[in-house]
Image: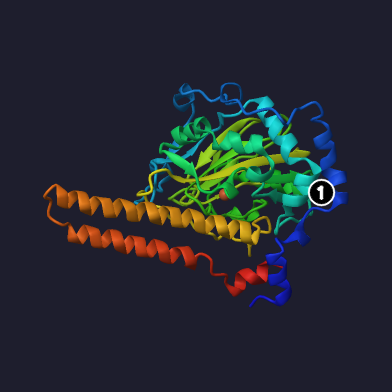
Amino acid sequence: MATAELLSNIYNNNIHKAISEQSYTENIEALYKALDGVDINTKFDPEKHIIFKKEDVEKTKRFTMKEFGLENEKQISAIGASAPFPLFSKEAVDIMRAEILRKDVFLQFARISPTSSSGLDGSVRGFARESCPFTYEAWKHPKSIEAVSSMAGVPLKIVMDYEVAHTNVAMKNPDDAEQETIAHNRELINKGEFFGKEQMIPSIVGWHYDSYPFVAVLMLSDTKKMIGGETIIKLGNGKVVSVEGPQLGYCTVLQGRLVEHIAPKPLGYTERLTAVSSYVAADPLKHEESVLHTVKPEVLFGSRYTDFYTEWIDYRMKLIEERAKYLREKVLNDQQNGKLFEKEKIMKFVEDLENYVGRTWKEMVVSDEEYAKAK
Ligand SMILES: [Fe+2]
C-alpha cells in the first residue's frame, strides 16, 4: 500500500524529484549558454526545419517484424524498427535544445530518473505544448508525422500531447570503471554472443517493451565523440541484434510495444539528450494495446498525476467514441443497403470495445510492488 507521504508526493507531481537549482547550474546551464544566439521565438517552418525526404524511406534500412522473428497478429505494421534517418535540421535541433534547457522549463518539468545512479540521469516530460511551442509544432506537424509514419510503414498519430518529445537527459558519468564494463559487455554482444548476457549491459532502463505501439527517437546531441548509443533488440529466436543509434537531427522508429529492447549507456559523451515521441495507429480500428507500465505517474516521476491521467482518459475516450461511431454508422448503413445483420461480427466488435474500456481502468491500477519502487 502507498503511504500518505508517497501519495502526497505523487499528487504534488513528484516535485521532490525535480533537479535542484544547484545541479542545474553545475550541469545544464553551460549547455544552455552555448546556445546563445539561438532564437527560440523562431517559427517552425517545415520547408526549412524538416530535412526528411520521401527517398529516405528507400535509402534507410528497415527491419521487418518477420526478420526479427516477432511477426504476430497484434502488430500494427510489418516494420519492426528502422535505422536512423534524417528528420530535423541542425537549426531545428538547436532551437529545441534552447527551449528545453531554459532554467524555468528545466526546473519545472525535469525529474531525476528512478534508476539514476549518478543522480544526473533524468527525463523531461509533458512540457512541449505548454512551454516549448517550437518543439511541439515540429513533432505535431503533419509533415513530421508523415515522415515517421512512412518509416514505420503505417499511418500514425501522436498518442497524446504528454508524449511529445519525452526527453531523456544523461550527463557524463565520471566513473571510468563503469564505462569500461560497458565497453567490455558491448564487445560480447558485438561478437554475437547469445542472449543471456542481458543483465550485464548497463543501461538507464533495463530490458523492456514500450507502453505505446510505436516510438520515434530523435537525437538532440552531437554524437561525434559518442561510442554506442544503439538499441539492442531481442529476437524471436532468443538472440539479440543491435540497431545503430541516430546522430544529431536523425531519428529511428521502433514498434516498441512488441519488440523487447534495451538502450545501453554509450561511452564518451558529456551530455546526451534524446527526444522520444510515442504514437498509435491513425486508424482507430487498428489493434491498439497501449499500456501504462512504464509511464504511469506512480512509477515515472516525470508523469504529473493530473496532467498525465487527464490526457490518458481523453485519448482513450476519443478512441472509444470513434469506434462506437463507426459501429453505429456501419449497422445503419448496412440496413439501408439491404444487408443482413452480421450478428457474430458485431458481437465480437462490441466485446473488443468492452475489453478496451476495461483495459483503460485496469492499466491505472498500481500494484504494491510498483508503489514499493516509487520512493
Ligand atoms: Fe523503450
Residue at point 29%, 58% (across, down): 349
Q: Is mark 1 within 8 Å of ligand 1?
A: no
Q: Is residue 226 above or below residue 46?
A: below
Q: Name the side, left or right, on which 261 lies relative to 134.
A: left
Residue lying at 63% horizontally and 65% vertically, measured from the top left: 298
Q: Is the residue 362 above or below the residue 249 in the image? A: below
Q: Quadrant of residue 206?
A: bottom right
Residue 261 image offset from top left, x and y in percent:
54, 49
SS under mark 1: loop
Q: Nearer the viewer, residue 351 or 116?
A: 351
Residue 152 horizontal side relative to residue 160, left or right: left
Res. 166 in view: no
Q: Kindly identify the residue that appears in the image at 65 percent across and 37 percent down.
A: 133
The spot of residue 260 in percent (x, y) is 51, 51
Query: Residue at the spot x=63%, y=78% of the render?
Result: 1
**Given the image, on which type of amino acid does mark 1 rest?**
Asp
Q: In the picture, residue 88 is in which quadrant?
A: top right
Residue indicated by mark 1: 175
Residue 262, percent across and down? 59, 49
